[in-house]
Amino acid sequence: MKLTVSRKAHFNAAHRLFRKDWSDEKNQKVFGKCNNPNYHGHNYELIVHVTGEIDEETGFVMDLKELSDLIKNEIEEYLDHKNLNLDVPEFADLNPTAENIAVVIWKKLRSFIETDKTLEIVLYETPRNFVSYRGE
């Protein structure tokens, strides 16, 4: 029997959506207000889902304290109050869209989650705009 356990977290970060190889006009047309050269910020809400079999000894799919610590140490401390474009190496040449941020988070966490478990990242950029990624 498979179940999913989930942990919610949040971080605040600034970014600018733009491509260095595009003109200012094209960046403005595609990314609009999100292309502000002085950056803009979001209060990101993150939900990490881990799906797997219940361990017969512990009764856990995954220890939620362990998952909480992992998210805090690997994600919140890494991204919180950062300028994603300037402070986070993964975004030096990668546009920090919600989609790309979710993939970066998934990659950072995947190696810490047992391989027989599925990892899904749900990232809310705003209360109404969110993405999810399962590594597919």
Image (tube, rainbow, N blue to C red):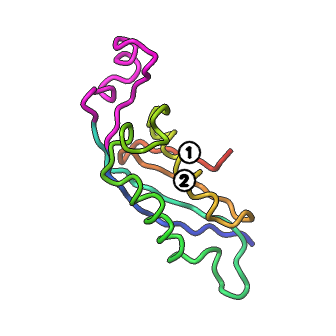
Q: Quadrant of residue 20?
A: top left
Q: Are marks 1 and 2 in contact (CB under 8 Å)?
A: yes
Label 1 vs 2, first from the N-terminus: 1
Query: Which residue shows up at 45% across the image and 65% down it?
Result: 73
Q: Quadrant of the N terminus?
A: bottom right
Check residue 37 for magenta coloring.
Answer: yes
Element type at mark 1: helix
| Magenta region, residue range | 14-39
Image coordinates of residue 84 in percent, x first then y, are: 38, 42
Task: Say what amino acid the circle numbered 1 marks.
Answer: Val
**Does 30 sit left or right of 114 as displayed?**
left
Question: In the rendered image of this protein, does residue 1 appear above or below residue 71?
Answer: below
Q: Which mark is residue 103?
A: 1
Query: Which residue shows up at 68% across the image and 60% down it?
Result: 118
Image coordinates of residue 67 in percent, x first then y, are: 53, 70
Query: Which residue shows up at 36% across the image and 55% down it?
Result: 11
**Does 93 sit left or right of 38 as displayed?**
right
Give the residue number, with chain letter if any, for mark 2: 121
